[in-house]
Image (cartoon, rainbow, N blue to C red):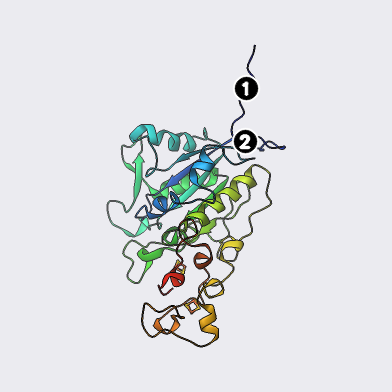
Amino acid sequence: MATAPVPYGRVTQQPPAVKEVDILWITAGLSCDGDSISITAATQPSIEDVLLGAIPGLPKVNLHNPVLAYEVGDDFMKYWYLADEGKLDPFVLVIEGSIPNEKIKSEGYWAALGTDSKTGQPITTCEWIDRLAPKAVAVVACGTCATYGGIHAMAGNPTGAMGLADYLGWDWKSKAGLPIVNVPGCPVQPDNFMETLLYLLYQLAGLAPMIPLDNALRPTWLFGKTVHEGCDRAGYYEQADFATEYGSPKCIVKLGCWGPVVQCNVPKRGWMNGIGGCPNVGGIC
Ligand code: SF4
Ligand code: SF4
């Protein structure tokens, strides 16, 4: 008896508009790889759920991240070269780490990934962005360095480090018409990134409208509220009952908390599986 073919992932009423999508993830900006490590803690959804087809309606997803890949060397890099040649389509480009300015140095390079087969020279991160961003269906900046420059872009800034939107332009659009999507955080909150990626995958699958972004290119549903608005200590603030030292359950604004003006959902969402959230657990924002 012939066996029916087993469908990839869970079956839904509407098959995705694209069957398969690759994610090319550069950690070779000025990066500590912390955002890649962070997303391994995601649970809503987990990276395994997305890659192993547990979520209904998604295309098959292939992740190429140098920190998480099993492949190394040429086996890993081949996907990048294929994408460069236009033979890997569609793909989402994720940038982790700030973008250096390769024009302000007199020799060498600031950041690179892989080698150019024609010249034998390293391919700089900037060159990869120049080559791949126009071919990507979506480009995502992951973490505070890639989004806005992060610690490398502080005063002095010898590498000319900047965020992706400062490099590509704030009005930049992908070939599919999507703006750059910024998911800041140092490191990125795991579920914030994976939920954004999930949204984009649903959008590519034809199952979600254009991703809503604020004027800093962040998903509005994740970054629309202040820390203060989601803080467990807000009742103490309301009563003007303030902590004067750490270890107190009261509002820590007088110890330096910036929660009233910072837009971040970590106190609501926690860090891992709902646990944590800076002021909730005693740390100033
Ligand atoms: S600890 Fe910070 S975020 Fe929480 S209520 Fe006080 S000022 Fe607001
Ligand atoms: S609550 Fe404040 S310190 Fe904590 S992750 Fe959010 S912005 Fe950073």
Query: Taking 161 as reference, is 134 above or below it?
Result: above
Query: Taking 276 as reference, is 67 above or below it?
Result: above
How packed mark 1 is, by other alpha carbons closer than 10 Å (few <14, some 14-19, many 20 or more), is: few
Ranked by sequence position, the earlier of labels 1 and 2 is: 1
Q: Residue at x 49, y 76 (%)?
A: 259
Task: Single out the residue that lies furthest toward the top.
Answer: 1
Which residue is at the front of the view, 232 or 257?
232
Residue pointed to by mark 2:
10
Q: Residue at x 38, y 53 (%)?
A: 29
Q: Residue at x 50, y 56 (%)?
A: 168
Percent across and percent down for residue 261 are 51, 77
Query: Taking 207 as reference, is 159 above or below it?
Result: below
Q: Count up the numbered dots.
A: 2
Residue 212 appears left or right of 104: right
Label 1 – label 2 distance at C-alpha: 13 Å
Residue pointed to by mark 1:
5
Task: Single out the residue that lies furthest toward the left.
Answer: 107
Labels 1 & 2 near each other (Cβ < 8 A): no
Q: Is mark 2 within 8 Å of ligand 2?
A: no
- Quadrant where the C terminus sits is bottom left
Percent across and percent down for residue 229 are 56, 74
Percent across and percent down for residue 64 are 44, 40
Percent across and percent down for residue 114 are 35, 40
Check residue 236 in the rendering and tell me which mark sits there, or answer none: none
